[in-house]
Image: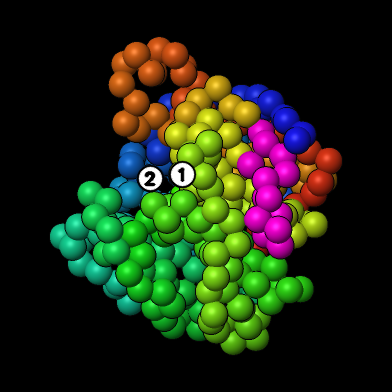
Amino acid sequence: MKVHKAQVLVESDCELGEGPIYLTGSGSVVWVDILRGRLLRYRMDTEALDVVEVGSSISSVVPRIRGGFAATLESGFFALDDKGGIVSRLGGAIHPQDSGLRFNDGKCDPVGRYWAGTMAKDGDAGKGALYCLDPSGKIEEKVSNVSISNGLAWNPLLGRMYFIDTPERSVVSWQYDLDTGRIQNPFEVIRLDDSHGYPDGMCIDAEGKLWVAEWEGSRVCRWDPASGNCLERIELPVSRVTSCCFGGADLSQLIITTARTGLDDKQLAEQPSAGSVFVANLSVRGFPVDAYPG
Ligand code: CA
């Protein structure tokens, strides 16, 4: 098995760094700190870091074709301006502020539908769901009884969508219709045994293989969804690895977010770079981030 070592790209003290995207135009990495409600941006060329307090928990962000961003805040989908200020709600409210739920991982599919799931803030099982905001602003619940919605990726050539409900320790594949967004016939394609951590964020490479971040696993592993086999791994010096995306000028670097939340003082002393963003150079490329057209 090929083993890579990740290096720190940006030192950061994110409680729950998550949802990295790479903007090819500016050569920037954008990610969120869910628990501290921060939107962070790092320019690869100038090494400038910009941190914005959004005023809400923010769990995912995507570029918006008309400018600025679309993002999931605690209770639903919102438009943000280019500086990270909240502009307006997109679609209706999903749950009230006092529901005990919050949004989690989200991403646009290859035609710009924004998929994002929810979870109970206390981790209570089965309280969340997976939603889809289409470019017209209509929101549809796609999957119910989800515990911790994570890890979205699509392979339109195969007509597959991949999804992770973290406590299940598996990656599920849906038959996916690119034209309608309909998903059906889920089945498990990857199972993470006890030698792995908990599957969290995920992205797909140009060969259709899945890169899955491992919470409590100190790594990102590359998996073949056809065989269910683990093919490569990227090792990190921190345990709580949360998500990943392809970036860099030729989209052959994996950008990886991590977390500090839940680590005790001893663990934080052993993992001083927990919460930072890491990078690993790969021989395979990924895809540019898909933007929201609505
Ligand atoms: Ca996540």
Quadrant, the C terminus = bottom right
Image position, residue 60 (x, y; %)? 46, 54
The residue at 46%/44% (across/down) is 198
The answer to whether 181 is drawn above or below residue 195 in the figure is: below
Image position, residue 31 (x, y; %)? 52, 44
The residue at 80%/49% (across/down) is 285
Mark number, residue 206:
none
Which residues are drawn in magenta?
221-234
* Mark nearer the viewer, 1 or 2: 1
| Corner quadrant of residue 267 | top left
The residue at 80%/57% (across/down) is 207
Mark number, residue 198:
1
- Dot 1 crowding, Cα within 10 Å, few <14, some 14–19, many 20+: many
Image position, residue 185 (x, y; %)? 54, 80
| Corner quadrant of residue 290 | bottom right
**Secondary element type, mark 2:** loop
Prevailing SS of the magenta stretch = strand
Residue that mark 2 sits on: 34
Does 196 lie within the magenta span?
no
Give how far apart the Cα atoms at labels 1 and 2 are: 18 Å
**Secondary element type, mark 1:** strand
Identify residue type, mark 2: Ile
The answer to whether 3 appears left or right of 272 in the picture is right
Identify residue type, mark 1: Tyr
Does 228 lie within the magenta span?
yes
